[in-house]
C-alpha cells in the first residue's frame, strides 16, 4: 500500500520540487498541498495523509504550532519538518513537537528520498506489528470459548513455536538460538500480572541465573550476561545475512518480505545486501536485539494461544 503525503510550504517551487521527488521515486501519492499553516491544517484534517512535509517558518502560523494543533485533533500522521534555519534550539523544539526527521533547505533530492524511504520502512513495520496485535486481541476474545477444546489437545511448547521461525531466518545452528528460546521461555512464563517488555539487562540476568541459583556469584553471572549478548548478536547477524542473500536473489520472496522488515531494521538488511553485492560479506552487521525479541515474543505468544 502506497503512502499518502501532504506538503505545506509557503514557497511554490519547494512544494512542486517535493511533489516531483515523491512521485518520481514512487514513494507514494501527494494528496494535497498548501502554502500556509492554517490552510495546511484544514487540508490535513480533511485528507488524513500518512506523512506530512511541513515548512518550519510560515507567515500565518509556523510549523510547530500547526503540528501541535493537528496532534490535539487526533491527527496521527508522521511529520517531516523542512527549513533553512540553523538554530539548534528551534530544531530541538521541532523534534520535541513530534517530528520524525528534519530536512534543511535548499532541498536535496537524495536526502529527501533517503528520509522518506526510512519513514516508509518504519510505517511498514508498524503495520505488521499492528496486524499482530489485532490478531492477538481477536484470539484473546476467542480464548474462553475454545478453552475446553484446547485443553484436549497437547499444547505447543515455546521451543516448538520458536524453532521454525528461527529456521526460516537461517539462524538454527547458531549458539544464540538456545539463548533466544530461553528468553522466550522466561518472558512467556512470567506471572499474569507482569506486563510489558522488561529491559534487556533484566532479561539477560534472568536467563543467566536460571538453574544456577546459589552455584555462582555475581561476577560469573555478569560474565554470562555478556556472553548471552554476544551470542545473540552473532545469531542475529547470521539471520540478517541469510535474509539479505534471499533478497538479492528474489526481492519479492515471501520470507524476505515478511521477516526482513518485521524482525530487523530494514536499512541494516539493505546495507548487508549492498556489502554482499560489493564483496564485503565479512563486514560488521548492525542488529537491533530488543526489536527482534519484542516481535518474536508477540508472534510466539500468538502461536501458543491458538
Image (cartoon, rainbow, N blue to C red):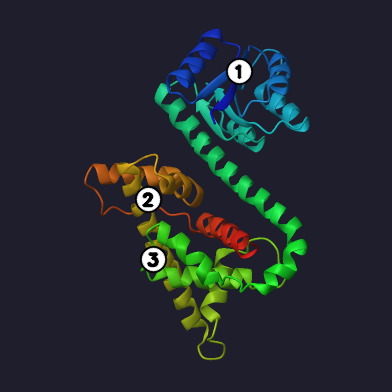
The answer to whether residue 292 is above or below residue 265 is: below
Q: Which residue is mark 2?
A: 243
The answer to whether residue 197 is above or below residue 71 is: below
Residue nearest the viewer, comparing 137 with 177: 137
Residue in view at x 51 percent, y 9 percent: 13
Residue nearest the viewer, comparing 5 with 36: 5
Q: SS of the residue at dot 2?
A: helix
C-alpha span from label 3 to label 1? 46 Å
The answer to whether residue 60 is above or below residue 237 is: above
Q: Which residue is mark 3?
A: 172
Position of the N terminus, as image quadrant, is: top right
Residue 42: x and y, percent?
73, 17
C-alpha span from label 2 to label 3? 13 Å
Q: SS of the residue at dot 3?
A: loop
Position of the C terminus, as image quadrant, is: bottom right
The answer to whether residue 242 is above or below residue 73 is: below
Pointers 3 and 1 in contact (CB under 8 A)?
A: no
Residue 293: x and y, percent?
53, 60
Relative placement, left or right, of 303 versus 72 is left
Locate residue 284: give its quadrant. Answer: bottom left
Q: Which residue is mark 1?
A: 31
Mark 1 burial class by Cα count in 10 Å: few <14, some 14-19, many 20+ = some
Pointers 2 and 1 in contact (CB under 8 A)?
A: no
- Looking at marks 2 and 3 on the same chain, the residue that comes earlier in the sequence is marked by 3
Mark 2 burial class by Cα count in 10 Å: few <14, some 14-19, many 20+ = many
Residue nearest the viewer, comparing 57 with 289: 289
Amino acid at each position: 500500500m502506497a503512502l499518502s503525503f501532504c506538503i505545506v510550504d509557503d514557497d511554490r517551487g519547494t512544494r512542486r520540487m517535493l511533489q516531483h521527488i515523491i512521485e518520481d521515486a514512487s514513494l507514494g501519492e501527494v494528496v494535497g498541498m498548501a502554502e500556509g499553516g492554517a490552510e495546511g491544517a484544514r487540508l490535513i484534517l480533511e485528507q488524513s495523509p500518512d506523512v506530512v512535509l511541513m515548512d518550519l517558518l510560515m507567515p500565518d502560523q509556523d510549523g510547530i504550532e500547526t503540528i501541535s494543533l493537528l496532534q490535539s485533533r487526533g491527527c496521527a500522521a508522521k511529520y517531516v519538518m523542512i527549513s533553512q534555519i540553523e538554530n539548534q534550539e528551534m530544531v530541538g523544539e521541532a523534534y520535541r513537537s513530534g517530528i520524525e526527521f528534519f530536512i534543511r533547505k535548499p532541498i536535496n533530492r537524495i536526502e529527501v528520498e533517503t528520509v522518506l524511504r526510512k519513514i516508509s520502512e518504519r510505517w511498514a513495520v508498524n503495520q505488521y506489528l499492528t496486524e499482530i496485535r489485532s490478531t492477538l486481541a481477536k484470539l484473546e476474545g476467542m480464548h474462553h470459548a475454545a478453552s475446553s477444546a484446547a485443553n484436549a489437545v497437547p499444547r505447543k511448547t515455546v521451543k516448538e513455536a520458536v524453532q521454525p521461525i528461527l529456521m526460516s531466518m537461517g539462524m538454527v545452528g547458531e549458539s544464540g538460538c538456545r539463548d533466544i528460546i530461553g528468553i522466550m521461555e522466561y518472558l512467556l512464563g512470567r506471572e499474569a500480572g507482569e506486563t510489558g517488555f522488561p529491559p534487556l539487562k533484566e532479561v539477560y540476568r534472568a536467563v543467566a541465573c536460571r538453574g544456577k541459583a546459589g552455584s555462582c556469584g555475581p561476577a560469573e553471572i555478569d560474565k554470562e550476561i555478556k556472553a548471552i549478548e554476544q551470542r545473540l548478536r552473532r545469531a542475529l547477524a547470521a539471520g540478517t545475512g541469510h535474509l539479505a542473500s534471499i533478497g538479492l536473489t528474489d526481492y519479492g520472496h515471501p520470507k524476505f518480505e515478511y521477516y526482513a522488515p518485521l524482525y530487523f531494521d530494514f536499512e541494516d538488511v539493505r546495507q548487508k545486501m549492498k556489502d554482499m553485492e560489493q564483496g564485503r560479506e565479512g563486514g560488521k552487521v548492525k542488529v537491533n536485539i530488543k526489536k527482534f525479541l519484542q516481535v518474536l515474543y508477540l508472534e510466539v505468544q500468538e502461536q501458543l494461544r491458538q
